Amino acid sequence: MAKQAPQSDPAQDAPRVGAPHHAAAGLPAVGHSLRMAAEQMGPRRTLATLRKVNQPDGFDCPGCAWPEPGKTHTAEFCENGAKAVAEEATERRITGEFFAAHPVAELAERSGYWLGQQGRLTEPMLLDEGASHYVPVSWERAFEIVAQELRALDTADGAAFYTSGRTSNEAAFVYQLFARKLGTNNLPDCSNMCHESSGSALVETLGIGKGSVHLKDLYQADLIIVAGQNPGTNHPRMLSALERAKRAGAKVVSVNPLPEAGLERFKNPQNARGLVGSGTKLTDLFLQIRLGGDLALFRALNQLVLAAPDGVDRAFVAEHCHGFEEFAAEAASTDRAEVLAATGLPWEQIEELGRMVLSSKRIIVCWAMGLTQHKHAVPTIREVVNFLLLRGNVGRPGAGVCPVRGHSNVQGDRTMGIFERPSAAFLDALEREFGFAPPREHGLDTVDTIRAMRDGTVKVFFAMGGNFVAASPDTATTEAAMRRCRLTVHVSTKLNRSHVVTGARALILPTLGRTDRDWTAAGAQFVSVEDSMGMVHSSRGGLRPPSEELLSEVAIVCRLARAALGPQDDTPWEEFAVSYDTVRDRISRVVPGFEEFNAKVRKPGGFALPHGPRDSRSFPTATGKANFTVNPLTAPEVPAGRLLLQTLRSHDQYNTTIYGLDDRYRGITGGRRVVLVNPADAAELGLADGSYVDLVGEWRDGVERRAPHFKVVHYPVARGGAASYYPETNVLVPLDSTADISNTPTSKAVVVRFEADSGL
Ligand SMILES: Nc1nc2c(c(=O)[nH]1)N[C@H]1C(S)=C(S)[C@@H](COP(=O)(O)OP(=O)(O)OC[C@H]3O[C@@H](n4cnc5c(=O)[nH]c(N)nc54)[C@H](O)[C@@H]3O)O[C@H]1N2
Ligand SMILES: Nc1nc2c(c(=O)[nH]1)N[C@H]1C(S)=C(S)[C@@H](COP(=O)(O)OP(=O)(O)OC[C@H]3O[C@@H](n4cnc5c(=O)[nH]c(N)nc54)[C@H](O)[C@@H]3O)O[C@H]1N2
Ligand SMILES: [Mo]
């Protein structure tokens, strides 16, 4: 098996291990973020930039999709938001000379960390067939090359158009329009690897694939359950919301195989007590669950609620729900021994949570990748919905479902039609507005796109952002698939691995980021985004772009569309490219909830999208009601002598972008190739603390998937499980190991065995 270029430089990757922290943020976080920002941007630019994050006249933080509180603070950003901003607003630059000095074969040996550290991309680059180096290319020529390769396809389905969730609403809308005008629904996106399971479960049960709470609901809740999410690192601003909820009397329960520092205590860097004091204790009850045990946990809770005298909100169930009897019969029969085995929890803890549930009127469940990236992710989330429906916790203040999104506009991109399985209603609206017949057959999602590239049916791969080969599962398979393409194209801000593992020809199209000023012939433009709670607002960058050459994502799509669709196409692409208001006018006529878009988006704070279940307890499902579902109890099976590996994020990364080699809250510094193992499991498996091992993935296809040279760290993870960082371990995630229904790779459940270290 070919070895992968590691994400971090092996020479520098020497993890040291200290004690895990028990509190998040506070003074060290502020210092850390400012230091990283100043390194990339210098002190003046740092101040000017960070002042504009998440302000009404500023730009939307590219860090995560957590909403902004209505009232603006002097600084509404967090440590990791500051790192995301610094990464983009860096003063380092990559020019044509850089590519002349570094052949692609050499860049392919470099780590992802090194590639990312080289700076912002500044001009379009072409890697021609058989060439060893990228060379500068004009925009016209670049678009012509893409158009040529698209024309050479037998069918438009020979192309796939990937989106990473930073893309603005306006860019996403013109992008999907272009793909559909070409004739394909092949619009895979990062969501397919992320919250797709949430969407699948919520659409079926509630009729809409989005969360049903606003920020103010958190402040009104009696009980907030945070399951499978690490907000201290990935959504730090959520900690302020939890702190405020706690002040208002809420209890917080965290369900996680790891004791995550951010959920234990929070030192709010925006007040003095948080900066120097001991902070607020956030978690009232910590359930250290086994990987994949959540379905069993929620089944058990539902059984307890069903058995309690006043457990079920009978009126709500009778008026608004469907399928209660079948669900209740199944849940009532839940076998306690199975629950204990699947969760690894003492029964008393589950009962304790049961009592908290029964004494709470308003309950919110928040979740992220710990629930979505399992084989049984969709049934797990359906069971969470059952749990909330049982006591009427949907569609009233202080209660609801809260899938916490990742990328800052991943939810908006889906709203704009970035979806391989668009609804008929969306396509009808597109057809009416633009007078063409959009393709109706479903397109390819991320996993199916990789299969199609591997099998030679997709030959042109186009990415609007992201880092497809590093973020996708089964790195060896995915890289080989990418290399089989005729053409691979990346619209990007920074250099990454996907630029150096290419098709026969490759293009890098550099683009403006969130922080950059966007001027066109029609004047200053702004874009819009939708956060995790369905709030839409504007985002306006203020920095001088890294080069005069850069085009916005909207302009890139529009110019490409003209080149590919020809002068006869009647969409006013030229107008769209200079005035985003004209794009928003179209969106307002195609996407429900965006009526008067141009007016509403100009109001400070933006506007809320309608959400039937939340606003009026109307459920646009197949039955017209909220659906209870029957979810047989399952949990991952792990053969003896193996552990179940979850692949997660460290504190110093943004997905495949590595900021540094520390994972401060978990006490790990100076390296990323670590595997966290429970000391009792380690003793049974003979894994000494500090020793080095290879991780070998096991899957029914018998293919060997090996991630060499990981340092064993004895760590308080739940028994039977282990944890390592993504993307170093993506090589272990089998392409065919996906969640039922959503087809999301099972990144939180990979069976591994441990072998002697083979070195890097
Ligand atoms: N700084 C920073 N912010 C980010 C990102 C980033 O990389 N860096 N990424 C963004 C993106 S795209 C996303 S999707 C989000 C991701 O946000 P998270 O979902 O918080 O990210 P992960 O690191 O994958 O963490 C998964 C959490 O779930 C727990 N977990 C794993 N398996 C299970 C399980 O079976 N049951 C339970 N109950 N818990 C489990 C893990 O221990 C861990 O705490 O963050 C977004 N924000
Ligand atoms: N094993 C494992 N795999 C996973 C996960 C996991 O938990 N475990 N998580 C999955 C999840 S939740 C997600 S969301 C995916 C993420 O998958 P992706 O979204 O594909 O990956 P990112 O690392 O976020 O993409 C980073 C790149 O985006 C580009 N970029 C940044 N900002 C912009 C911009 O404004 N415009 C444009 N055009 N480009 C920009 C930069 O070039 C940067 O290198 O990974 C998934 N893969
Ligand atoms: Mo994500």
Image (cartoon, rainbow, N blue to C red):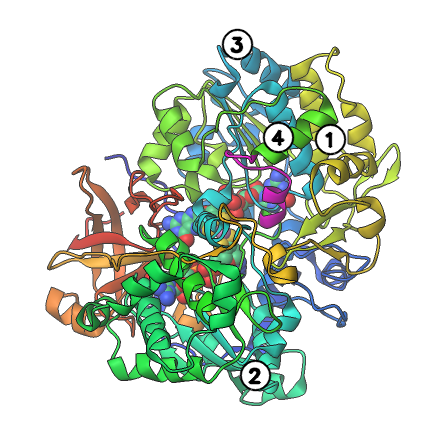
Q: Position of residue 451 (x, y in %)?
A: 36, 29
Query: Which residue was labeled with disc 2?
Result: 246
Q: Amino acid at mark 3?
A: Ala
User: Is 279 left or right of 607, judged from the image as shown?
Assistant: left
Query: Which residue was labeled with disc 1?
Result: 555
Q: Position of residue 426 (x, y in %)?
A: 62, 35
Q: Amino acid at mark 4?
A: Leu
Query: Which residue was labeled with disc 3?
Result: 152
Q: Amino acid at mark 2?
A: Lys
* Cβ–Cβ under 8 Å for marks 4 and 3: no
**Nearer the viewer's eye, disc 3 or disc 2?**
2
Give above or below for 389 relative to 543: below
- Using the numbered discs, state the Cα–Cα distance from disc 3 to disc 2 in whole angstroms: 60 Å
* Cβ–Cβ under 8 Å for marks 3 and 2: no
**Nearer the viewer's eye, disc 2 or disc 4?**
4
Query: Whereabouts is ligand 1, in terms of quadrant?
Result: bottom left
- Using the numbered discs, state the Cα–Cα distance from disc 1 to disc 4 in whole angstroms: 23 Å
